Image (cartoon, helix red, strand yellow):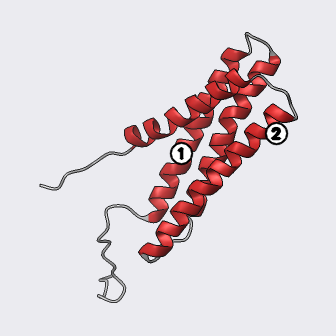
Amino acid sequence: MALSPSTHRVCRVLNSAAAGRRLALRAVTYQFAAVLLVAAVFLLQGLSASIAALLGGSGVVFGSALAANVALGGGVVPARVAFFRLALGAGLKWTVVVTIFAVALGVGRLPPLPMLAGLAVALIAYPLVLNFSVRVERER
C-alpha cells in the first residue's frame, strides 16, 4: 500500500518533547537509585542518618520528576510558554526541596549532614545521567 502525501509525515526534529520527558524521567530513576545507595551507606551511622539522607535526596528526586512533567508535559508550544513552563518547573522543584528540608529538620529533628549528602548526590547524579544517556548521531 502506497502512502499518499497527506498520510505520510516527515519528522524534521532531532528530538521530540516526549523523548525529552522520557529521558528526564529515566534520569530521575537513576537519581533515586543513587540516593538509595547513599542512604544505605548512612545506615552504618544509624537509622536516623539513613532516613535523613533518603529524605534529602528524595526531595530532589521528587522535585526533578515534577519539574520534568511540568516543563516537558505539554507538547509543542510557543517559546514563551515553554520558557514559562521551564521556570515554573524549576521553581516547583526547589519549593519541594526546601519544604522537605524544613519539615525534616524542624519537625523530624533529623541530622543535617546526611540530608546534605543525599541532596548533593541527587544533584550530581541527574546531569551525569543526562550527559551519558544521550547518543549523538552525526549525519554524513
User: Residue 97 at what x, y percent from top left?
Assistant: 68, 43
Badges 1 and 2: C-beta atoms under 8 Å apart? no
Instruction: Indicate which disc residue 54 carries.
Output: none
Q: Residue furthest right?
A: 107
Residue at label 2?
A: 103
Secondary element type, mark 1 = helix
Q: Quadrant of the C terminus?
A: bottom left
| Sequence order check, earlier mark of 1 and 2 | 1
Asked if one can make out residue 72 in the rendered structure from this viewpoint, the answer is: no
Secondary element type, mark 2 = helix
- Please tell me whether mark 1 or mark 2 is closer to you in this view: 2
User: Residue 80 at what x, y percent from top left?
Assistant: 46, 74
Asked if one can make out residue 55 in the rendered structure from this viewpoint, the answer is: yes
- Measuring 57% from the left and 43% from the top, which residue is drawn there? 28
Left or right, residue 35 beside residue 45: left
Above or below, 104 against 23 in this view is above
| Amino acid bearing label 2 | Val
Q: Residue furthest left?
A: 140
- Measuring 46% from the left and 38% from the top, which residue is drawn there? 129
